[in-house]
Amino acid sequence: MRLYLDAFYDFLGGPLDKRLRPVLALLVVPLLFALTQPLWRIAMEAPQYPAGLHMDVYAYKVEGGNEGQHLQEINTLNHYIGMRALDAAAFVDTAWIPFALGALAIFALRVAAIGSVRGLVDLAVMTAYVSLFAFGRFVYMLYTFGHHLDPAAPVKVAPFMPAVLGSKQIANFTTHSLPQLGSLLLGVFVAGLFVLLALQLRMGRREAVQRARAA
């Protein structure tokens, strides 16, 4: 058992395969572009709004459709049911996301340049943590928006959970919540990273088998 552990630790401390390094560096491109694109879109339709209203959630801001008019209209509607305004202050819990993505980009470039297999594993673990934690915070914020309603609001609505992914009927509004280009770009980075990790592990296993046969 000790021999297997020693071999595994030696493998983790070994250099990242040179064929994977440029691919990892290229994966930083969609990661950085994700900062410039909307991550999520929340839209709603109702008989009085047949064309619909929508707002886009970026890593660093919230932007309404029709040059911001939609966001103002959504906040006006939310005010009547006692929901807090959807603005930058409401999304302060996600203000760390641009810094986290920037840190991942720097770490990925470092691993691509001088990193080891252990560095690639650490990068994959950090990426998974940031992705899951950010999505979890987003879901929690939606929950608080729908459950922390002002009891003195003009229109009484029972606490509700807004749509996280897909569509949902709330009163006379049909709401939609869907990922956008920024999330797709992040998905490319995450998927590509784990593919590289799987390839590195497979090549390491193949080399270990070859050494065992040679011995």
Image (cartoon, grey):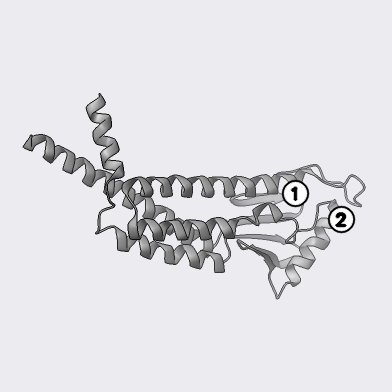
Q: Which residue is mark 2?
A: 80
Residue drawn 53% across the image and 45% down it: 132
- Of the 4 image quadrants, the one containing the C terminus is top left
Q: Residues within 10 Å of mark 2 (few under 14, many from 20)?
A: some
Helix, strand or loop at mark 2: helix
From the viewer's side, name the closer residue of 9 and 33.
9
* Quarter residue 210 falls in: top left
Residue visible at 46% across and 60% down? 106
User: Left or right of 59: which side holds 202?
Assistant: left
Residue beneath disc 1? 145
68 versus 15 height, above or below:
below
Camera-side residue: 43 or 142? 142
Instruction: Assess disc 1: are there few (<14), some (14-19) or many (≥20) residues with their C-alpha within 10 Å of its C-alpha.
Output: many
Q: Is residue 60 above or below residue 151?
A: below
Q: Is residue 38 above or below residue 146?
A: below
Q: Residue 185, how many percent across, how many down?
A: 47, 62
**Amino acid type at image mark 2:** Tyr
| SS class, disc 1 | helix
Which of the 4 image quadrants contains residue 46? bottom right
| Quadrant position of residue 173 | bottom right
